[in-house]
């Protein structure tokens, strides 16, 4: 089942399935990036990710995170937290898309660019998913 992941209204990422394993930088792990992430499933359900284990870093791990920041693989689980409406999905993706534009420094006429992107006119999950898929800036690094 396809999902659209939105983090902090700043990043948008698409998945063909909820990822069982995620590779993340250690600094992101210390900041618990997953707490601000939501997965919008094509069946209208809303999910919150959580690492199964291995996300608690010892002092040495926290020091490494703030110096060389290596990557670590986490096993993820997901908790269903409810359902969403198409309007909620469109709004969330649009905010995420604006955050992506701001993060890459493309701040000129962000609102107009998001409107041109066509999210507000998407009629269903599939259209939103396809619009996100074609935009290269919506696949962030963890």
Image (tube, rainbow, N blue to C red):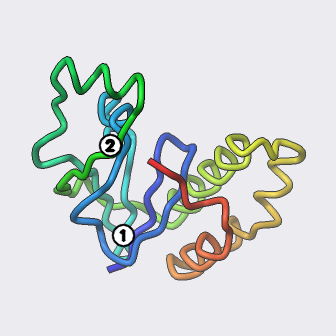
**Foreground residue among 53 and 119:** 53
**Residue beneath the point at 51% across and 67% down:** 86
For label 2, count other residues whose C-alpha is less than 10 Å away and answer few (under 14), some (14-19) or many (20+): some
Residue nearest the viewer, comparing 105 with 62? 62
Whole-percent x, y for residue 27 in the image? 38, 31
Task: Provide the residue designation for mark 2.
Answer: 34
Residue in the picture at 51% in, 57% down:
88
Quadrant location of the N terminus?
Answer: bottom left
For the question of whether residue 79 can be seen, the reply is no
Does the rendering let one see residue 89? yes
Question: What crowding class fits label 1: few (fewer than 14 Cα within 10 Å), some (14-19), or many (20 or more)?
Answer: many
Residue 121 in the figure: left or right of residue 47: right
Residues marked 2 and 1 touching at CB (< 8 Å): no
Compare marks 2 and 1 and give the one earlier in the sequence.
2
Tag of residue 41: 1
Image coordinates of residue 59 in percent, x first then y, are 19, 17
The single residue placed furthest to the front in the displayed view is: 68
User: What residue do we see at 15% from left, 23% from top?
Assistant: 58
Q: Quadrant of residue 135?
A: bottom right
Q: Measuring from the top left, give residue 93's x and y in whole percent.
A: 58, 57
Q: Which residue is painted at 74% across and 70% down in the image?
A: 118
Residue 68's spot in the image, x, y percent?
A: 41, 31
Q: CA distance from mark 2 to mark 1?
A: 16 Å
Disc assigned to residue 115: none
């Amino acid at each position: 089942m396809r999902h659209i992941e939105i983090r902090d209204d700043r990043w948008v990422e698409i998945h063909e399935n909820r990822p069982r394993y995620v590779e993340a930088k250690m600094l992101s792990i210390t900041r618990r990036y997953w707490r601000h992430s939501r997965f919008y499933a094509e069946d209208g359900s809303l999910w919150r990710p959580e690492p199964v284990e291995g996300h608690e870093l010892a002092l040495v791990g926290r020091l490494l995170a703030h110096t060389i920041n290596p990557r670590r693989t986490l096993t993820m689980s997901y908790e269903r937290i409810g359902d969403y409406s198409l309007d909620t999905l469109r709004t969330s993706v649009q905010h995420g898309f604006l955050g992506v534009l701001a993060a890459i420094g493309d701040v000129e006429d962000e609102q107009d660019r998001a409107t041109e992107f066509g999210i507000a006119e998407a009629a269903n999950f599939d259209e939103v998913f396809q619009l996100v898929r074609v935009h290269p800036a919506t696949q962030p690094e963890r």
